[in-house]
Amino acid sequence: MAEPKDPLDSCAGFEWDEANGPKNWERHGVTKEEAEDVSFNKPLVVRSDIRHTRREKRYYALGQTSRGRCLFIAFTIGRNLIRVISVRDMNRREQDFNGKHDEEEGASLSL
């Protein structure tokens, strides 16, 4: 069976909706730079977000910034760009899952 294709492989950067950047800062205290930083660090767990996929395929990622902040990021991919929908600190369950994934697999992708 073939390995699942990493949806981030084809991405060349980020696209931000004018409202989402400030909204994520106001609601969750997370900057655009922190959200983008997560994609450059391991472990990074990416999964399809089946519950929220309607008109476009959605994903979520669990990862850490370079400073160690654990973030949950909901996003879509369009025109080879990651469009962040929402970003916030991971809750306890997400942190436990991310830590367990890191110990078992040593990083990367899970779809």
Image (tube, helix red, strand yellow):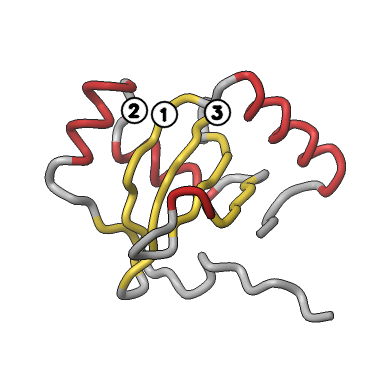
| Residue for point 36% across, 73% down | 80
Gap between marks 3 and 2, in whole Å?
A: 11 Å
Vertical comparison of 13 with 97: above or below: below
Instruction: State which quarter of the image contains the C terminus.
Output: bottom right
Please tell me whether mark 1 or mark 3 is closer to you in this view.
Answer: 1
The mark found on residue 88 in the picture is 1
Residue 70, numbered circle = 3
Q: Quadrant of residue 48?
A: bottom right
Q: Position of residue 52 (x, y in %)?
A: 44, 49
The amino acid sitting under disc 2 is Val
The location of residue 14, given as percent across then percent down, is: 32, 58
Q: Residue at x 80, y 34 (%)?
A: 100
- Amino acid type, label 1: Arg
The residue nearer to you, when weighing 33 against 62, is: 62
Most foreground residue, 35 or 77: 77
Q: Residues within 10 Å of mark 2 (few under 14, many from 20)?
A: many
Q: Residues within 10 Å of mark 3 (few under 14, many from 20)?
A: some
Viewer-nearest residue: 54 or 99? 54
Q: Give the spatial CA distance, label 2 vs label 1.
A: 7 Å
- SS of the residue under disc 3: strand
Total numbered circles: 3
Left or right of residue 110, residue 12 in this image = left
Give the x, y percent position of residue 103: 84, 37
The structure residue drawn at horizontal position 27% and vertical position 21%, both measured from the top left corner, is 27
Mark 2 and mark 1 in contact? Answer it, CB < 8 Å.
yes
**In x, y percent, where is residue 47?**
60, 53
Identify the residue position indicated by label 2 in the image: 30
